[in-house]
Image: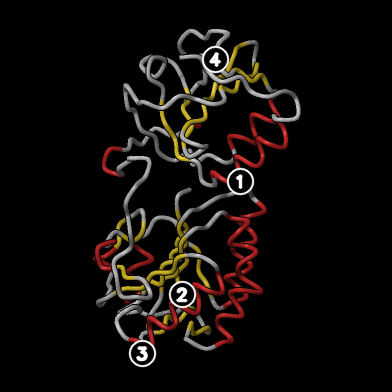
Amino acid sequence: MPRLSLISDSADRELDAVRRTVDSFDRIAGVDALISTLRAHALRRMHAVTLDLIGHSRGHGFLVLGNWELDDSPQTAATFSELVRPWLDAVGVRELRLLGCSTGASERAREALRKIALGARREVFGTRRYVSKRDYDGGGFVSDDILVNANGMAPDRRDPVGFLLGAATAVPLAALDLGAGPRLTNDQPLVPVNEAIATAIIDFVDGARSWVLPGLLAEPNPIVLWSEHNSIHRLELLLDCQVVRAYGAYPDDEHGRLFRVRDPLGLSRYLDEVLRPRSALRARST
C-alpha cells in the first residue's frame, strides 16, 4: 500500500463528496483516532510511504481532523513527536500531506508544517490553493502539483532510481508466481535462505506496483534464493537495497519485475544481521 488516506470525521457536504470519491480511507475523529488507526495498520503489518490527512482548514490554513486542529503550537509538535511518530515508524510513512485548503499558503500555515515536520521527523507538505473533490480520484489525492513544503517550494520529486510512476504497471508482487529466473552461476553472490528470512525480506518491499526495465545496468548483491513448494524462488537486491527484482512466469522470466523497497536502510540492516555473520558475500566477477 503506497499511501493511507485519513479523512476528518466531519459530517458535511464537501467531505462527504471526497469520501464518495476515494475508494479506501479511514475516518478520523481526532488525535486519538489517528493514533488508533495507525496502530491498527501497523499490527496488520500494512505499510504506506505517504500519509494523507484530509480535512477542512481553519484560520491561517491549519488543518482540522475531527476535533483536532493541527496548528503551529508547541503542543502540536509535541503530539507528533511523542504520540504519533512511533506509529509512523511502524507503518513506514516517509511523508505527510495536509490536504485542506491552502494549508501551505500563509506564513503561519508553513510554520505549522515546520513544527509538524520537526516533531514527526518527516517531510510534511501543504497546499497552495483551495482543494475540492476534483483533486481526488478512487486512489486518493491526484493534484501533486499544488503541494508545497514549509519553505513554500514544490516537493523535490527527483528519483535517484529512475522509476517514473507513469511507467509503472499494475502487476503487484503478490500476483507473481516466483521462479528462479535466468540461469545462475557460481560466481554470482548467491545466498540461500529459509522461507522465514525470505518472507521478512519481502515485507520490506512495496509490492503494489512494478516496473519492467530491460537492460537495467545494476548488478545484484545479493541474489537471495529459497525453496518453496519444491521449486526455487529468487529475489535480487539492487542499488543498495533500493530495489528488488523478482522473476515469475513468461514474460517475466527474462527481465523480471522491479519493485521499490520501502525502507532501504532497514533492509540493509536486516541483511547485515541475518546474512553477514554466515560468511562474507563474494563479489560478482566481471
Foreground tag (2 vs 4): 4
Q: Nearer the viewer, mark 2 or mark 1?
A: 1
Q: Which residue is mark 4?
A: 188
Q: Earlier in the sequence, mark 2 or mark 4?
A: 2
Task: Give the percent coordinates (x, y) of residue 17.
Answer: 32, 69
Residue 200 image position (x, y, % from top left): 65, 36
Q: What residue appears at the point 64 percent right and 59 percent down from the top-left corner?
A: 40
C-alpha distance separating marks 2 and 1: 32 Å
Which residue is labeled 1 in the image?
A: 266
Graded by Cα atoms within 10 Å as few (under 14), some (14 to 19) or many (20 or more), the crowding at tag 1 reads few
SS at mark 1 in the image: helix
User: Do tag 4 and tag 1 residues touch (Cβ < 8 Å)?
Assistant: no
Q: Residue lying furthest right in this view?
A: 277
* Quadrant of the image occupied by residue 53: bottom left
Type of residue at label 4?
Answer: Gln
Q: Nearer the viewer, residue 253 or 162?
A: 162
Amino acid type of the residue tagged 2 in the rendering: Ser
